[in-house]
Image: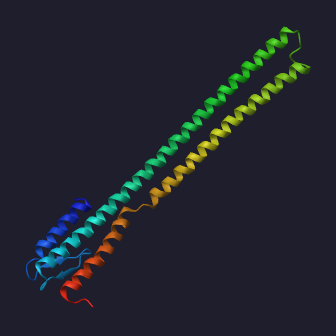
């Protein structure tokens, strides 16, 4: 199957060459036909060029919309990869915070025990409890921050996917064809002397 631009070139050329002789038929953009009897060779060529240009414009609109759709889909995938990476790094940070907290608590226990304090009672126990509390608080903060960043990336990805879903290459090409069909019809009416 030919791409829209190639079809446009073929249609424009066929229309131009076929319209040069008296009584030739010009294929319209929407499949309609019109006789070109009485049109001059230059008018028929101009009409054919308009048809070809319209089809090429539709092909270009199709391709641009297709590229925009693919770009938006790629951006959505990249946003998901970024979200997964943010979550992974957040979990790694949470584990590193947990390890640092365990190391601090171990150092505290060694220090307190070397001073002959009971680790299960009073200030020594309170100090260890506070270390556990702040360690878990920092772990939760690391995970929460990662979750928020991942959510933001996924929201951005959803926006990109919405853009991709909104792109309709066939609609873009169809709109371009309809707009061009009106211009071709206007020229045909003017050239054939049927215009107002």
Q: Is residue 131 above or below residue 107?
A: below
The percent coordinates of residue 143 (x first, y second) are 66, 36
The percent coordinates of residue 13 (x first, y second) are 15, 68
Q: Is residue 125 above or below residue 181?
A: above
The percent coordinates of residue 103 (x first, y second) are 72, 18
The percent coordinates of residue 67 (x first, y second) are 37, 54
Residue at point 26%, 67% (across, down): 55
The colour scheme of the drawn protein is rainbow
- Residue 192, located in which quarter of the rendered image? bottom left
105 or 60: which is nearer to us? 60
Q: Is residue 68 above or below residue 24?
A: above
Q: Is residue 164 left or right of residue 41?
A: right
Quadrant of the frame with the C terminus: bottom left
Which residue is situated farthest in the left direction here?
A: 21
Residue at point 26%, 81% (across, down): 185
Q: Is residue 133 above or below residue 122?
A: below
Q: Is residue 170 left or right of residue 19?
A: right
Residue at point 84%, 13% (across, down): 112
- Residue 147, located in which quarter of the rendered image? top right
């Amino acid at each position: 199957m030919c791409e829209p631009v190639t079809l446009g070139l073929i249609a424009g050329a066929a229309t131009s060459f076929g319209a040069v002789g008296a009584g030739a038929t010009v294929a319209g953009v929407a499949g309609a036909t019109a006789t070109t009897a009485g049109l001059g060779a230059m008018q028929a060529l101009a009409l054919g060029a308009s048809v070809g240009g319209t089809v090429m414009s539709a092909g270009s609109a199709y391709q641009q919309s297709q590229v925009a759709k693919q770009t938006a889909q790629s951006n959505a995938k990249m946003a998901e990869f970024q979200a997964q990476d943010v979550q992974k790094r957040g979990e790694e940070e949470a584990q590193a915070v947990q390890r640092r907290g365990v190391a601090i608590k171990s150092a505290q226990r060694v220090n307190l025990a070397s001073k002959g304090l009971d680790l299960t009672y009073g200030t020594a126990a309170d100090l260890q409890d506070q270390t556990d509390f702040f360690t878990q608080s920092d772990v939760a903060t690391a995970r929460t921050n990662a979750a928020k960043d991942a959510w933001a990336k996924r929201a951005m990805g959803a926006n990109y996917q919405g853009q991709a879903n909104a792109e309709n290459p066939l609609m873009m090409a169809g709109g371009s064809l309809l707009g061009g069909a009106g211009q071709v019809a206007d020229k045909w009416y003017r050239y054939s002397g049927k215009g107002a």
